[in-house]
Amino acid sequence: MSTPDSTPHPTRCLKCRRILRNPSPDGLGPKCRRMVRRTARLNPPAAFKPYQLAKAVELLEMGGLVPLRANRIFLTVSDDGSEVYRTAATGQCNCPAGLRATSPCYHGAAAHLLATAA
């Protein structure tokens, strides 16, 4: 008779998949978090406006970005937490602002920052 495994699975970093000793709300390890912030500060993508980058960093810090496929496709939570959008690392998103495509949304900026942080 087998019993379910009662040991918890280790929490892993969303970017590099290393085991985290101390789980964080954003799901990133300290090194990956540092790289994402450095990328946003030193090499901001030209397609995104400064306020979008600020909201993208806030979204990452709140843990509102979950990788779906190999750090290329992400599930992104909306501002109020009521909706979940699919966002590509290239900046494409299925949120209302992303579908209008007049300018890229901050969900795309967050996905781009997370994917390009080396």
Image (spheres, rainbow, N blue to C red):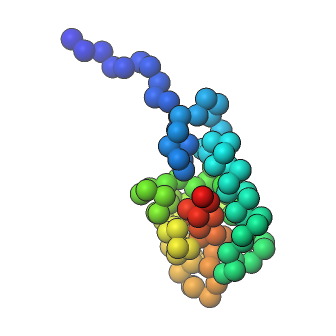
The one nearer the camera, 27 or 32, is 32
Q: Quadrant of residue 98?
A: bottom right
Q: Is residue 7 left or right of residue 33?
A: left
The one nearer the camera, 98 or 36, is 36
Quadrant (top left/top right/bottom left/bottom right) for the N terminus: top left
* Vertical comparison of 114 with 44: above or below: above
Say if residue 101 shows up in the picture.
yes
Expressed as whole percent of the image width and height from the top left, the position of residue 56 reads 69, 63
Expressed as whole percent of the image width and height from the top left, the position of residue 78 reads 62, 62
Q: Quadrant of residue 52?
A: bottom right
* Vertical comparison of 30 with 99: above or below: above
Expressed as whole percent of the image width and height from the top left, the position of residue 105 reads 63, 75
Q: Residue at x 48, y 58 (%)?
A: 71
Q: Is residue 25 left or right of residue 18?
A: right
Q: Residue at x 78, y 72 (%)?
A: 51
Quadrant (top left/top right/bottom left/bottom right) for the C terminus: bottom right
Q: Residue furthest front?
A: 118
Q: Quadrant of residue 59?
A: bottom right
Expressed as whole percent of the image width and height from the top left, the position of residue 90 reads 52, 73
Q: Is residue 6 left or right of residue 43?
A: left
